Image (cartoon, grey):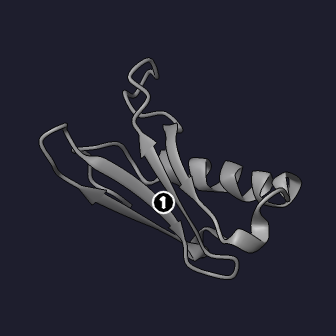
Amino acid sequence: MSSAHFVRIDRDDREGGRHYVVHAADPRFTLELTPDQDATDGSGRGVLRRLCVPNSWAGDYGRYAKLLTQAQDFFARSGGPGRPRG
């Protein structure tokens, strides 16, 4: 899988913001992450808050575990909150 399949969405709110990584290719899923405050850069690979996967994936943990790792790597590469993305 290429990182071209992932999209990062950052939304500001009262709690400081929400950060999502969306896998736009098949199979589609959405990860909501919180920056890891203990990481040296203040963001790290993120801490998983929520995962939305298609019903057809329920129980197929091995299949999407690899994609979740790639999504967290994409989150780390795309920069932390308040930093330019690139």
For disc 1, the marked residue is 21
Q: Is residue 57 above or below residue 39?
A: below
76 horizontally vs 5: left or right: left
Q: Is residue 11 above or below residue 79?
A: below
Q: Residue at x 60, y 48 (%)?
A: 73
Instruction: Note whether residue 25 is visible.
Output: yes
57 horizontally vs 35: left or right: right
Point out residue 8 in the picture as x, y percentages from the top left corner. Answer: 41, 63
Q: Nearer the viewer, residue 20 or 52?
A: 52
Point out residue 28 in the picture as x, y percentages from the top left corner. Answer: 62, 75
Q: Is residue 31 above or below residue 46?
A: below
Residue lying furthest top:
38
Q: Residue at x 19, y 37 (%)?
A: 15
Q: Nearer the viewer, residue 37 or 82?
A: 37
Instruction: Note whether residue 1 is visible.
Output: no
Task: Give the residue type at disc 1.
Answer: Val
Point out residue 46 in the picture as x, y percentages from the top left corner. Answer: 49, 38
Q: Nearer the viewer, residue 57 or 7?
A: 57
Image quadrant of residue 63?
Answer: bottom right
Image quadrant in which the C terminus is located: bottom left
Image quadrant in which the N terminus is located: bottom right
Point out residue 70 in the picture as x, y percentages from the top left corner. Answer: 67, 55
Residue lying furthest bottom:
26
Q: Residues within 10 Å of mark 1 (few under 14, many from 20)?
A: many
58 horizontally vs 46: left or right: right
Q: Secondary structure at mark 1?
A: strand
